Image (cartoon, rainbow, N blue to C red):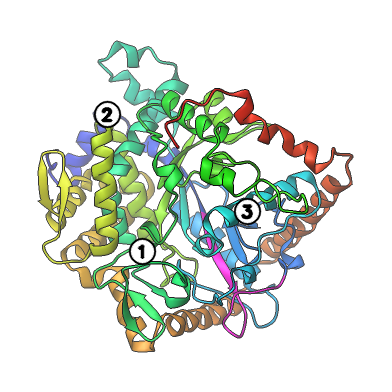
Amino acid sequence: MSTPSHTAQHAIDMINTKFDVNVLQGMQRGIERESLRMQANGYLSQQAHPMALGAALTHPSITTDYSEALLEFITPPTKSIANTLSILKDIHTFTYQNLPEGESLWSLSMPCMLDSQDENIPIAQYGSSNLGQFKTLYRKGLAVRYGRRMQTISGVHYNLSFPDELFEALQLQETDLALKNLSLQDYRSHRYFGLIRNFLRHIPLVIYALGASPSICRCFVTGREHNLQKLIKGTMYLPYATALRMGKLGYQNSAQRQLGIHYNNLTGYLAGIREATQCSYPEFTALGLDDTEGNPVQINDHVLQIENEYYSVIRPKQTPQAGESPSDALQARGVAYVELRAVDVNPFSPIGINAESASFLETLALYCLLNDSPEISENEQAMLDRNQALVVERGREPNLEIEQLDGTINFQAWMQQQLQAMQYCAIALDQALSNNSEKLYQSALNLMLERSNDPAKTISAQMLEQTRELGGTWAFGANLAKQYQDFYQSHHLGPETLKQFEQDAVESLQLQQQLESQPQPSFADYLKPYRRLAEQHSCVSAIV
């Protein structure tokens, strides 16, 4: 791919031949950020989800993920990065002000407050309704399949959508009649899948530029084989690692690696997801569906209990309506947005992400959307997997080379080529969305160029430096937790914002109570359809 001229006017002229740059004002983004609650003694919180924060089952912006102690903060879609980050800051502030005495939030992706007993990682509880019991059972299934420790990892998910006006403009320029004649819904899905494929090709860049898990607390690898080295007492690392969260110590699933789910088109993607949720997997069958007392321990023995169990660095998304699964929603209304999931929590930000990272992700996403995106073959996917594993463990290594379809290339040179090629997208986004004097998107891209030129400027390198200085991962994380606790105690919510948070908490508790008071079948009956899927479908998967 050739590198465009970097003059602002040339970039705008070039992009205006494709579409009016101002349609980018219709972009929307939202963030989901996870963080563990930590006790004053440094260990994972054992207390229930704070009542003052509302009901995790039904609250619109404050919920839990795997563990009762793993909070998840969710912002609504907004039209600016600044607004999204401001909302996320308010959610953090309200949460900090309502944590049990002595508790704080852990600011790293990888945990460092786990004792030797997995049972002391409490599974999230959602009440007595069938929906609530189902959500808890799903997490019990994750525990028996993969262990509880893996589920304590935190991340940031960045949700991004582009306006229909952009897709309409792009479709008008298509020379392929088949694409030109697609409905807007189908064309939009086609372009989003192109974005996804190109994003997969750029995962090494994301992991290097935003990776923030180069080391881990020794407690995390208790009883596990690993190739880590000792950095300092209680801390393990690899000298040139960037994001161990994204490697074999993070979210990995041997069954899923054999799925063959691809992103070449929506039809194939949905077929793969549905097969995985309908077909048994021998290793999971051997775990049993129920314990000796007849209580369920996993929803079913399928490759995926439900669709959300599919671990991927990016997902096509559509908001489900009542009674719809994620795949049903995608089939009915196509792709509405993408969820970028390869982002570590930035420990140097009180909210886990900053404007520079958000701007870089949006620039990359636009670049991935606008450029040609051939289908990914099995050979290319295997190559991409190898590149990801390499950059996770050795991304800052001098003279590192990654694979391309036509040979190998110096990783640093490749990153700089890609970042230079994205300049026209950053310029367009700045014209449409940013203050002219600020140039947020171009500044963000320049920051990533600096990191590509000098590994010492990466988040991962800075983390290792401070971890050494402070005496280990625990000391580093605890120091940040104290800083951010003080930060949020001094940040005051406006009266209307505080009133809305308090109202959301009360209403979420009331809604959960309503769900629990309604007549409902027994949980065993509620579960039956999810356990009959393998019987109802002919599974042709090669997974054995």
Lateral position of residue 426 relative to residue 415, left or right? right
Q: Residue type at mark 1?
A: Leu
SS of the residue under disc 2? loop
> Label 1: which residue?
244
Which residues make up the magenta segment? 32-47
> Label 2: which residue?
18
Q: Nearer the viewer, residue 453 or 126?
A: 126
Q: Quick check: can you spot residue 21?
A: no
SS of the residue under disc 1? helix
Image point (28%, 71%), residue name:
238
Instruction: Compare marks 1 and 2 and give the one earlier in the sequence.
Output: 2
Image point (43%, 53%), residue name:
252
Q: Position of residue 514 (x, y in %)?
A: 85, 47
Q: Nearer the viewer, residue 126 or 150?
A: 150
Q: Which mark is residue 139?
A: 3
Spatial CA span between label 1 and label 3: 23 Å
